[in-house]
Structure formats: C-alpha cells, structure tokens
Amino acid sequence: MFDVGFSELCLIGLVSLLVIGPERLPKVARLAGFWLGKTRSMVAAVKEEIKLELQAEEMRQIFKEQSGLNEVQQMLDETSDALKSPLAPPPDKTEPHEPK
C-alpha cells in the first residue's frame, strides 16, 4: 500500500523520539501497533463480508437465470405437446375385423 523503505522508517522513528520523548515512545509505539492491528483485522473482515455478499448475489443471479430457463423449457414442452396432439381424436386402436 505505502512504499516505505528502511530509511523512511528510521527517519520516522527519530522524529517520533524527538517529539514524543524516550519515556513515552514505547507506550505510544505499543498503542499504535494495537490500533494498526485492529484496523487491519477490521479491513479484512469487511473484505470477507463484501466477498460473501458478492458470492451470494452471484448465486441469486444464477438461480434467477435457471428459473427463467426452466420456465422457457416448460413453455417449449407445452408447445411441443400441443403440436403433437391432432385436432381430431385418435383412431380407435382395437383389432380390425376381418371380413368373412
């Protein structure tokens, strides 16, 4: 995220040592580390929640498309059944009578 090298860290440490003082610097460093860790964990949790929401939305979209395909398939089946059935009733399938 931030491109901070060793020399920049040394400069930050020296300035903070001069501004804060050697007595309070360890306590401030611990507090800053604590809040940095807490912030990182919160960011990771938010990223995970967004990822789960996107996956859930993707699944909803897939189910919606699938139900739409099922409706189309059902309509096609009904249409093909209607085309297969003739207008007149089917002939009687009893055995034909043989003439004597």
Image (spheres, helix red, strand yellow):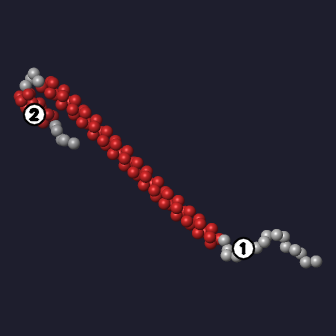
Query: For the residues marked 2 and 1, what is the alpha-carbon distance in whole angstroms?
Result: 96 Å
| Dot 1 crowding, Cα within 10 Å, few <14, some 14–19, many 20+ | few
- Residue 64's label in the rendered image is none
Which residue in the rendered view is the most extreme toward the bottom?
Answer: 99
Q: Splitting the image into 4 quarters, where does residue 15 fall?
A: top left
Which residue in the rendered view is the most extreme toward the right?
Answer: 100
Q: Splitting the image into 4 quarters, where does residue 6 fall?
A: top left
Q: Is residue 9 above or below residue 23?
A: below
Q: Name the residue nearer the viewer: 12 or 6.
A: 12
Q: Which residue is mark 2?
A: 11
Q: Position of residue 78 (x, y in %)?
A: 59, 66
Residue at 28 percent of width and 35 percent of height: 41
In the image, what residue type sits under mark 2? Leu
In the image, what residue type sits under mark 1? Pro
- Residue 89's label in the rendered image is 1
Q: Name the residue nearer the viewer: 71 or 14.
A: 71
Q: Quadrant of the C terminus?
A: bottom right
Which residue in the rendered view is the most extreme toward the top?
Answer: 23
Residue 81 horizontal side relative to residue 19, left or right: right
Q: Is residue 26 above or below residue 1?
A: above
Q: Is residue 27 above or below residue 69?
A: above
Q: Secondary structure at mark 2?
A: helix
Residue at 18 percent of width and 28 percent of height: 31
Q: Position of residue 75 (x, y in %)?
A: 55, 65
Nearer-N-terminus badge (2/1): 2
Q: Name the residue nearer the viewer: 92 or 41.
A: 92
Residue at 22 percent of width and 29 percent of height: 34
Can residue 25 be seen here? yes
